[in-house]
Amino acid sequence: MSYRMVCFQRRTVRGLCVGLIVVASLWSLAAAAQSPEIPRGKHGDATAEYQMERLKQLSGSWDVTQAPAGFDPVVWAAFIPQDNPMTPERVELGRKLYFDTRLSRDNSVSCATCHDVTRGFTDQRPVSEGIEGKLGKRNAPTTLNGALLQTLFWDGRSPTLDHQARQPILNPIEMGMPDEAAALKAIRDVPEYQEAFKKAFGREMNYEDLGRAIGAFERTLVFVDSPFRKFLRGDAAAISPQARAGWELFNGKGRCMTCHPMNPSNPLGTDNRFHNVGVSARHQDFEALAKKAVAALAEDPSEQKLDELAVGTDLGEMGRFMVTHNRADMGAFRTPLILNIGITGPYMHDGSMATLWDVLDHYNKGGEANPFLDGGIEPLALTEEEIDQLVAFLFTLTDARFAEENQRQFGAQQAAAKKQRPFRDEAMALRQTLPFEKRVTGEKTKDK
Ligand code: HEC
Ligand code: HEC
């Protein structure tokens, strides 16, 4: 379908069509995939009461001082920071804090606003909405299985969950607290918290411990029991023949496993490294942005400033470069874990891809040409049947406890992909057009 026709059909975006089509389709998909019966608050997130109830059903009982079922205790212990052992008191305190909107300046936002239990522990929006309805520039990753990652954030600027949890509270467009003291003040007078901090840490309330408590809670969000895991353990019938064909493509023609390794000892599907796969290259002039980024960070090199720039400005499109200032990292982002991928759309660091079909179309055409593109990205010549097989495989990576939501998202994405495939480019996928031609001839690359 041509651009013009799509624009014509979508009256609301006619005129402003370029770029907006994708955003509009993301929103209509989000609406279609909603579960209607859930009570929701101001930012569209399920109410805290509803989320907590749902979490109880999902988690079941687990002695948090032990490794989760199916994990080797030695391996699990390596994921727990030395200064923050898992105790029921810390986990319980962290759970309260995760759902508490008092930690935001306008009392309307908690971690659970953007990492919502009923939405795959993300917000299922392209980019997140914080206090006073402010929109950031980045897509919220899921908090599921964050315990197993080596670095956090799309650019890996945070080393641990305990450290990460302290950032959004102070971010001006997320939870907006002016400083640590203000955040503590907001909960200091709640007697329940005073007690809970004492019990959990044996000392006065402080900001580091607040991060530790939330981190301990997040380490309980281990959800890896997918049909694919059963398949890996030898139950061939756990996934469909179509998904099995997708798994072969994932390791073969699709070359996905070079960055998203999946095997019994690494079930996450990330190499924990940073790659430019061409997502931000669609919009940005890297050289100009790099200069601005270096200047802004020279003026204020604090981690809070970095967080502010990464989440709230176009400089964040530089990805890992913002952390290392290494040219090789321009436009590079951490390979995301792809467990539970069916329920954590829209996709990529900027939420620019509504469906897994879009993601496959992007890879199939060899990403987006740019001088920093990872060498592992090249046109794949996948057929439509093969793309369907890969998508079917990706939908088997969702924990069985979210099976219903996974099925609903599959239906909504399939319907959206039938209407529109904005990233599809067969000529590029089949190398009939070569990706670097445009740059060499000086023509600007832009959205197809
Ligand atoms: C306004 C929405 C919003 C709020 C509120 C919010 N987050 Fe996030 N979260 C995001 C976005 C967006 C990112 C990605 C930012 C980036 O990579 O620069 C993120 C990233 C994360 C990550 C990293 C995941 C990964 O795969 O690297 C974790 C963990 C996380 N948030 C936990 C929390 C916790 C804990 C809180 C509460 C203290 C919280 N978030 C509050 C939107 C939000
Ligand atoms: C060169 C490394 C590399 C290869 C090869 C690769 N990926 Fe990725 N993948 C990434 C990175 C990095 C991102 C995040 C990019 C961004 O947001 O800018 C990503 C993002 C994704 C996402 C979106 C995840 C989310 O939470 O938003 C999916 C799904 C995905 N890849 C699947 C695949 C599949 C399927 C293949 C094979 C066809 C593949 N990838 C090949 C590195 C790679």
Image (spheres, grey):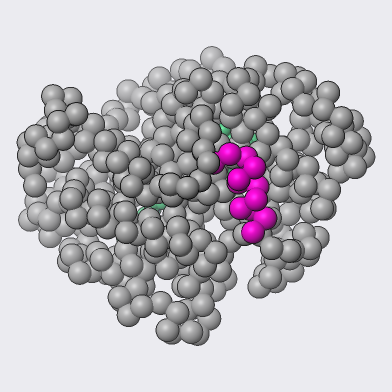
Residue 316 visible at all: no
Task: Report x, y in % for residue 182.
Answer: 72, 18
User: What stretch of residues is rendered in magenta?
Assistant: 46-57
Can you say which quadrant of the picture contains the C terminus?
top left
Please tell me whether the stretch drawn in magenta is mainly helix, strand or loop: helix
Q: Which residue lies at the image location 36% right of the left edge and 78% below the top edge?
A: 240
45, above or below 237, in the image: above
Q: Which of 325 and 394 is in front in this view?
A: 394
Q: In this view, does 147 lie to the left or right of 202?
A: left
Taking 238 as reference, is 275 above or below it?
above
Q: What percent of the width, then of the height, locates residue 105?
A: 63, 20
Dividing the picture into quadrants, the one containing residue 96 is: top right
In the image, what residue occupies the spot 55% across and 36% down?
113
Residue 382, magenta (yes or no):
no
| Quadrant field for ligand 1 | top right
In percent of width and height, residue 363 lies at 27, 54
Residue placed most toward the observer, 135 or 234? 135
